[in-house]
Image: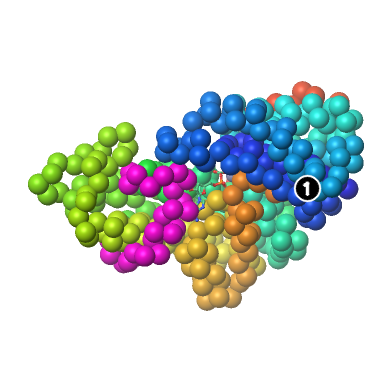
Amino acid sequence: MLILGIETSCDDTAAAVVANGTDLLASIVSSQDTIHAPYGGIVPELACRSHIANIRPVIHTALDKAGVSLSDIDLVATTQGPGLIGALLVGFSFAKALAYGLRKPLVPVHHLEGHVNSIYLEYPTVPYPLVTLVVSGGHTDLYYCPQRGHYTILGRTRDDAAGECFDKVAKMLHLGYPGGPIIDRLAQQGDAQSVPFPRAMLNKETYDFSFSGIKTAVRSHLLQITDSTEERVFANDTFWPLPETSRWEQQRNDILASFQQAVIDVLVGKTLRAVKKTQAQAVAVAGGVACNSSRRHAMYLAGDTGEFPVFFPSPKYCTDNAAMIACAGYYRYRETPQCYHQQNFLDLEAHANLAIPDLHR
Ligand code: KG4
Ligand code: ZN
């Protein structure tokens, strides 16, 4: 069965052709990073407009690369939510029209279930029960999964998502967008022990996270250490003017490494506690922040110590892509194929705050 996956929930226009759920024939992602970079974050209207311009070429490139045509597609899978509503609408409406015109089924996919499914693209069988951490620019969610497609939410962020926090700290320091990969690189040249940033809620019973405090701690630390003859301020969430001393670069890298370590300690600590408490057989980590090299290293180390396997998708499947959407769509279709035919999908709409399917509390 050939699945066409479509993803436009945020700032990447993506299409993929996947055979039978995990056999990847093509995955195309058109990034809008250069469009949003000058603003230090995503501008929803610009994202929506770029999706409109990109959606057709991206789908056609995916089909060409896979060596198939539209008429070969058996199933269309597309992100229904959550995400930016204007961005979601482009991919969702396009997919609906396409499935209707081709007389094929359409499977609406929850974006986070897509991220969870990115694991199966490379590891089709993972042991259950599984603790899954989805950590992206919009979400930081910890789930217990007794079996594939079933989720019990253990905890989530009460304020900023971890990726959002990386992006905001990078913006403070004029480093560009998205901040995660830049901080990942610069932190490798810094001392992670140099600033004792808070590990928010690490020792509390809850599995919830909070990342807004560490952002404020970085801000206060910057004002403190650079307080010299020149007056420095935060304007538009950016630190002005940046110091020009010879020490500054090292100082900045030390701050970034310490910040990154504080975020990682909380993510790894809570995941580890969840594994112990639930007696899960394995851990899976997905979403853009799962690309982080120190984070991968720390989680693998925790897995070695605790003697449980840890699964990370390759970086290209951690960030938003449509292969994970096709994979999730195929799985849902196989469960209940009768649910996805035309009479069922014409009334469906995209939802900015869609709840994950089969979620238990
Ligand atoms: O999953 P994703 O592509 O989009 C959302 O669904 O949000 O995640 C994007 C987020 C951004 O906040 C970006 O800064 C972060 O993932 N990210 C990273 C790294 N690569 C991307 N964060 C830390 N380290 C990285 N290497
Ligand atoms: Zn995502």
Which residue lies under the disc numbered 1?
A: 65
User: Which of 248 and 210 lies nearest the eye of the viewer?
Assistant: 248
Q: Position of residue 272 (x, y in %)?
A: 51, 65
Rendered position, 153 above or below 291: above
Q: Position of residue 279 (x, y in %)?
A: 61, 66
Q: What element does badge 1 sit on?
A: helix
Label 1 is placed on what type of residue? Lys
According to the image, what is the colour scheme of the structure?
rainbow
Question: Is residue 46 shown to the viewer in this render?
Answer: yes
Q: Which residues are magenta?
A: 172-196
Magenta residue check for 339: no
- Which residue sits furthest top? 347
Classify residue 292 as left or right of residue 309: left
User: Which of 354 and 151 lies nearest the eye of the viewer?
Assistant: 354
The residue lying at 44 percent from left, 58 percent from top is: 184
Question: Is residue 213 shown to the viewer in this render?
Answer: no
Rendered position, 62 above or below 117: above
